[in-house]
Image (tube, rainbow, N blue to C red):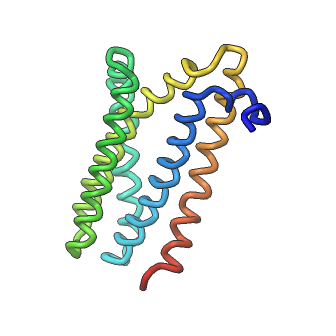
Amino acid sequence: MRGRLPPVLRERDYSLLLGGAIAYGFGREMVFVAVGWQVYDISRNPFHLGLIGLAEFLPLPLLALPAGAIADRLSRKLVYVGSLVADAAITALLIVVSIGGAGSLWPFLALSFASGCSAAVGNPAIRSMWPTLVPLGLLTSALALRSTVFQATVVVGPAVGGLLFAVGPE
């Protein structure tokens, strides 16, 4: 079976990180759908959905330089795992807020901003790890596959999240 895989997927560490990135990407996109759904359910105001998106995005340009410096100075693996742990904690807090019957926008804004901060710190670390996981001759294939997988999670993840809402427990 292993011989039938494309050469880049025969690289163990690359394949493991790619599998984790796929799972994380789908989960993250589904959380975005859930947050958007809840915010709209609370306020019925489309502008608030835009604020959530802004809260998620703002940390990226604000933290780009310091996050890159962190990824250069510390263990990239440690930085990335730290961002994943932070994102898991943020998702757990979103669950607590949701179960608690949040009736206002601010907890979702704060947690979306925190999630954006986590992504802003983790992204430079993981992006600099990919080239270290494959031989130079496979780098183009590795980066192309990573990019394709990322785009697929961005497109398919929200669709799966929406489908789960459509067939959900209610």
Give me the residue at 41% from left, 71% from top. 37
Q: Position of residue 88 (x, y in %)?
A: 32, 49
Q: Position of residue 152 (x, y in %)?
A: 63, 50
* In-image side of 29 versus 39 (left or right): right
The outermost residue toward the front is 1
Give me the residue at 25% from left, 54% from top. 110
Please identify the quarter of the rendering in which residue 101 is found. bottom left
Residue 40 vertical position relative to residue 88 in the rendered view, above or below: below
* In-image side of 154 versus 48 (left or right): right
Please identify the quarter of the rendering in which residue 133 is found. top right
Q: Does the image show residue 103?
A: no
* In-image side of 166 versus 156 (left or right): left
Q: Position of residue 150 (x, y in %)?
A: 59, 43
Q: Position of residue 9 (x, y in %)?
A: 67, 32
Residue 168 vertical position relative to residue 28 in the rendered view, above or below: below
The C terminus appears in which quarter of the rendering?
bottom left
